[in-house]
Image (cartoon, rainbow, N blue to C red):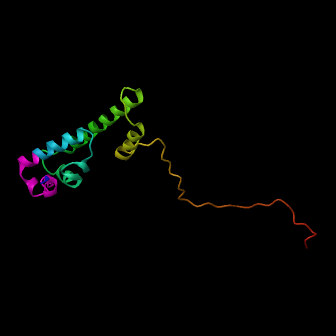
């Protein structure tokens, strides 16, 4: 029988209670850092974004600086791919890369300009013509 049908490959996400164990938490933090450095998002990690955020800063061995550095390193991985696509040293779909960068890291090829006007506008109409005597 196929293991997938029996649920043999199903992995349960860690719980907050399981993360109370220091050794288990250290292992999951290390796995999360490797995941992020490889260019993946925290949402796609085994911990998921919510548990990753719960770890940051709450536990002494899970500093936000390490999390931010891993995110930057992952972004560098994607930028290296983009540089290779632009120079021709890497084969791939540049549109897919651009799409990934815009959605993962907020990149845009357009400037974001706020065109909303919050103030009022007053218009004064001044006429310099004299009323005609024919219309009277």
88 within the magenta span? no
User: What is the magenta range?
Assistant: 3-26
Residue 132, given in percent of the width and then of the height, sits at 90, 66
Residue 58, given in percent of the width and then of the height, sits at 15, 51
Along the horizontal axis of the image, is 123 left or right of 103?
Answer: right
Along the horizontal axis of the image, is 67 left or right of 87?
Answer: left
Image height check: is 133 above or below 128? below
Residue 43, given in percent of the width and then of the height, sits at 25, 50
Name the residue located 21 percent from the left edge and 52 percent from the top edge: 48
Q: Nearer the viewer, residue 117 or 29?
A: 29
Name the residue located 85 percent from the left edge and 60 percent from the top edge: 129
Residue positioned most to the front: 1
Q: Nearer the viewer, residue 115 or 52?
A: 52
Q: Quadrant of residue 123?
A: bottom right
Name the residue located 93 percent from the left edge and 69 percent from the top edge: 134
Residue 12, given in percent of the width and then of the height, sits at 14, 55
């Amino acid at each position: 029988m196929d293991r997938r049908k029996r649920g043999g490959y199903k992995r349960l996400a860690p719980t907050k209670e399981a993360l109370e164990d220091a050794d288990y938490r250290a292992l999951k933090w290390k796995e999360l850092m490797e995941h992020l450095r490889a260019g993946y998002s925290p949402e796609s990690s085994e911990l998921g974004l919510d548990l990753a955020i719960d770890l940051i800063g709450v536990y002494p061995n899970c500093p936000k600086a390490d999390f931010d550095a891993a995110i930057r390193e992952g972004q560098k991985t994607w930028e290296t791919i983009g540089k290779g696509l632009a120079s021709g040293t890497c084969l791939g779909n540049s549109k897919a890369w651009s799409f990934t960068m815009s959605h993962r890291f907020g990149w845009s090829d357009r400037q974001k300009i706020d065109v909303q006007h919050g103030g009022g506008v007053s218009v004064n109409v001044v006429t310099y013509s004299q009323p005609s005597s024919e219309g009277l």
